[in-house]
Image (cartoon, helix red, strand yellow):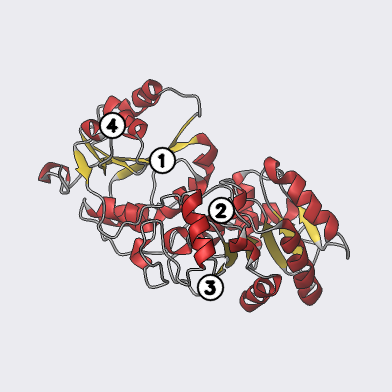
Amino acid sequence: MENHPPSSILHPRRILVRGTNWLGDAVMTTPALMRLREKYPDAHIALLAPEKLADLWTNHPALNETIPFAPDESVFSVGNTLRAGKYDLALVFPNSPRSALEVWLAGIPQRIGYARPWRNFFLTNAVVARAEAVKMQKRSIGEIQRLAAADVSRRVDSNGRVLTNAATNAHQIHEYLHLVAVLGANPEPMPPQLVVNPDEIEAARKKFGLDVIGKPVFGLNPGAEYGPAKRWPVEKFITAARDIQNRTSCTWLTFGSKADLAVASRIASAIANPPFAIWNLAGRTGLREFMALLKLCRVLLTNDSGPMHVAAALGTPVVVPFGSTSPELTGPGLPGDPRHRLLKSDAPCSPCFLRECPIDFRCLNGISVERVVEAVLSVV
């Protein structure tokens, strides 16, 4: 396996980047895309992305083109679409066999991605994993029970390594930066970046009536697609939001997908007074409108989720209770960014990377309303 491409591809004219499939992961690739643009300022850079994420990339300075694909589109169809682009080089961010097969079927002569089972044949440069990479391996129920019973006082990842705030080179953004560094791009991290223009922001402000309320706007995102182990309890969201509203007279915008509508409605009902205290926007916005509204918020109180990453990449401070996942590995923005507040309990079994807690949910129950309220007030 090679870690360095041949000299024949050091000056590609047309580059295809196979993007990631999830919102948060997509945002974390933006530093690598910016470094790629920095390395090849005159190249045509196209991004292949799931159609649900295509609008995320509108006007992004790293890209010339976004190529969407449907969830039911076959690998052969995708390969055929890409073949027409006559790309010199493909950079494959996902680790799946399919993503490598797509660019192989497209006939792209140079194909770079991480070495993984069932796909190395399709890559011309299968890159070995970084020495600093930390695998997000799920803990077993038995391990969680042993750690909880022993009340271990230090936080360790699933490989037994202690995770501290100093371990910034373990963050997921470095995985993508490492791939572009193979091409000679600068591997130094930079903040994730997304773009919304002033016209989009003004249109969203008017559409949802925010131009008439005259109050500071805060965001609330109580959902998390991965599972309940990443969701701070709804009752705590309600109590914290009430307290913050009482102390700031803010207007809350509650975000979420259609699947979050019941939770968002419950929160909205509990904070409905006084007038303009909360606007329930769950399931009511397109991706670009959602981004514009996040940009309007002074702060987003959110679970670890895709919206967390989007807000940070738009420059909106985030306050995040972390439970089953690790801010050292997948936290928002650039690791160590002082604008954000990433809250953790001292639960010895966290992070476990499970979708559901098999014991008493102590990781997120251990983060108090008072801590969250003070964290929000400290950034607004």
The amino acid type found where label 1 is placed reads: Glu
The residue at the far left in this view is: 7
Instruction: For mark 1, give the secondary structure.
Output: strand
Instruction: For mark 4, give the secondary structure.
Output: loop
Nearer the camera: disc 4 or disc 2: 4
Q: Position of residue 125 (x, y in %)?
A: 19, 41
Residue that numbered label 4 is attached to: 118
Q: Nearer the viewer, residue 342 or 207?
A: 342
Nearer the camera: disc 4 or disc 3: 4
Say which residue appears at 20% left-offset and 32% top-offset.
109
Residue that numbered label 3 is attached to: 339
Residue that numbered label 2 is attached to: 305
Sooner in the amino-acid sequence: mark 2 or mark 1:
1
- For disc 2, the neighbor class at 10 Å (few under 14, some 14 to 19, many from 20) is many
Residue that numbered label 1 is attached to: 65
Residue 325, can we see it?
A: no
The quadrant holding residue 310 is: bottom right
Nearer the camera: disc 3 or disc 2: 2
Instruction: For mark 2, give the secondary structure.
Output: loop
| Tag 2–tag 1 contact (CB < 8 Å) | no
Task: Give the spatial CA distance, label 4 vs label 3.
Answer: 41 Å
The quadrant holding residue 185 is: bottom left
Task: Give the spatial CA distance, label 3 vs label 2.
Answer: 18 Å
Q: Position of residue 55 (x, y in %)?
A: 53, 43
- For disc 1, the neighbor class at 10 Å (few under 14, some 14 to 19, many from 20) is some
Sooner in the amino-acid sequence: mark 3 or mark 1:
1
Q: Position of residue 68 (x, y in %)?
A: 46, 34
**On the rendered image, what quadrant is the C terminus found in?**
bottom right
The amino acid type found where label 4 is placed reads: Trp
The amino acid type found where label 2 is placed reads: Ser
Q: Nearer the viewer, residue 151 or 181?
A: 151
